[in-house]
Amino acid sequence: MASTSSSTAVDERERKRKRTSGGESPAAGAEAQPSKWQTRREHEIYSSKLFEALRLVRAGSPASSTTTPARSRLVREAADRALAVAARGRSRWSRAILASRRRRLQAAHRARLRAPTVPPSRHPSAAGTSAAPGKASKTPALARKAKVLGRLVPGCHKLPFPALLSEASDYIAALEMQVRAMTALAEVLSSVSSSASASASGSSSSSPPPA
Amino acid sequence: MANDHFFPGDYFSSGLSAPFLGASYAQAPPSRSSGLDAAAMAFGLPWADQQLPGAADSSAATTTAHFDSALSSLVSSPASAFFAHGGEDDVAIGDLIGRLGGICNGASANNSCYSTPLSSPPRGPPLPPAAFRALETGRLSRVSSSKSLGAPATALEYAEAEASPNTSAMPDPPATTKGAARKRKAPAKCKAKAEPSPPLPATAVTNAIPKRPRVTDGGSSDENAAVPAKVELEEEKPEPVKDYIHVRARRGQATDSHSLAERVRRKRISERMKLLQSLVPGCNKITGKALMLDEIINYVQSLQRQVEFLSMKLSTMNPQLDLDGQYKPSKDMNQVTMPAYASDEPAGAFSYASSPADSFAMGSAVAHHGLELQGTFSWEHDLQSMVQMGGASSSSHSQDPHAFYGK
């Protein structure tokens, strides 16, 4: 466990360093740059927000009241919301995530998610539905891929190509940070819980806390 | 010296300017007088061959001087003789263009600008024939009108009209003269820019040259007014070629803004694609927007899948978070905050690593919030045990947890 966690920490450190050096390219714009997601400060902010969100989820649904898939969905949405809040509303996808949570019902959101997720799997096969079957599908290939990408990034399905690319780069950086934070959290919790179980089994340390 | 190879003075003075002018057409111009063809064959090839070898030296000043002298000589003796002819319009035009083109070629070759982009000798001679053809389509009226003004004025105004910005200096209707204006401008730009920056006219010429075979008469939109923009196209050779294929309109203003906007848009897209390439791992070798988009889509999907998986993992671990949910976080948060953020021991303890970069964030956050979640003593025990396992300055930490759980 020590080796895995240390190696993971080392890997994450290296990746963060590498990403920081690579992400600081001058993509200046009005919105935040993707290199913002690679700073340690941002990571701390997101980790605390994530923890708060998880706590709320846990408090909102007591144990064994919700099934695991529903709970994982809740956890995932909480994590996405925390990520969107960490973005401070400077990116379109973060605003879309927060707006969707606020306005739409979860069921409606899920129903809307069902429809767009099906076509991307069909896209490689059914190329003639949208474009003319006779003409060369080389030209719409980029447009099709852009549409798929627009569906993947929340709230960017009708965006022009350059804006879509910048949103996608910001979203990718944010997703990477989210994955790192959740991995670290899961690791910490698992290590703590395993040591807690070990210590609980090993010694009788279940004395009540000093009031 | 190399100058002699390019502009042999004896050629000028010997009155062989007529064959010399024709000599710039290494390829036989279509439907021209046969005498010129023969002369072209005789003088064109050796003259064209001598272009590249002499590319190493010869300053632009001498080139310009030669150009001026050649132009004056052309204007004075043979041009006037040619212009005096009745039906020799196109021949005169062709000679003038060939002259300008040839001198421009010589200038560019002198400054060794040919070698880098093109590096093919036959590029030089095609310039005048194409220019000739383009000229004969649209410029006959102009030459005939200028013929009345006089031969010297014609040649000089010809060159100077192109030296000035095209949009302001072209009195002709833009529709008919786009093709011709493009050709004329190239050699004139050679002349205009020979002194300040030798590579520029060469780049203009070389930019013009590969496009001529592709674009017959109409697609010269870029070159008409966007010469500085065209010059910067030199770095990206395939891109202006694509511009020429797509942009076919003949109106200068519209296509200029379109092509410029296209170029700006393309540059913006390529910037963003480069940024994405740095973000997505393993995309350094991939060129092309479609493949890059594929990789980006795959990467986003994999990241989202990872988030799903981790959220499922965290949801299963969530019950473990409140083993003992009786801890009141409010008053102890402040105490927790300072030590947790001040030292990186908790992070070091949690990650078992000496220098926690991002585990620090996790550890501090967990220490910040997690003390309330975990069973207090179990947490404290874990913390202490981990600190002892971490080894570094465990003493400071053995005190802190007690402070956390203090009265």
Image (cartoon, coloured by chain):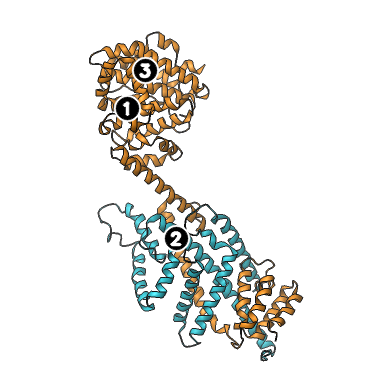
Q: Are marks 1 and 2 on the same chain?
A: no
Question: Which chain is home to disc 2?
Answer: A
Residue B135 higher or lower than A166, as above or below: above
Q: Position of residue B333 (x, y in %)?
A: 63, 79
Chain letter, colour cyan in render: A
Q: Are marks 2 and 3 on the same chain?
A: no
Q: How many marks?
A: 3
Distance CA(mark 1)–CA(mark 3)? 14 Å
CA neighbours of label 1 inside 10 A, class few (<14), some (14 to 19), many (20+): many
Q: Position of residue B90 (x, y in %)?
A: 27, 20
Image quarter for residue A158? bottom left
Q: Amino acid at mark 3?
A: Ala
Distance CA(mark 1)–CA(mark 2)? 47 Å
Name the side, left or right, on which B165 lies relative to B383. left
Residue B75 higher or lower than B181, as above or below: above
Question: Which chain is home to disc 1?
Answer: B
The kind of secondary structure element at disc 1 is helix
Q: Amino acid at mark 2?
A: Ala
Chain letter, colour orange in render: B
Residue behind mark 1: B130
- Label for residue B23? 3
* Label whose residue precedes the other's in the sequence (1 or 3): 3
Question: Residue at 52% across / 16% down in the picture?
Answer: B1
Name the side, left or right, on which A113 lies relative to B147. right
Is residue B25 in view? no
Residue behind mark 2: A168
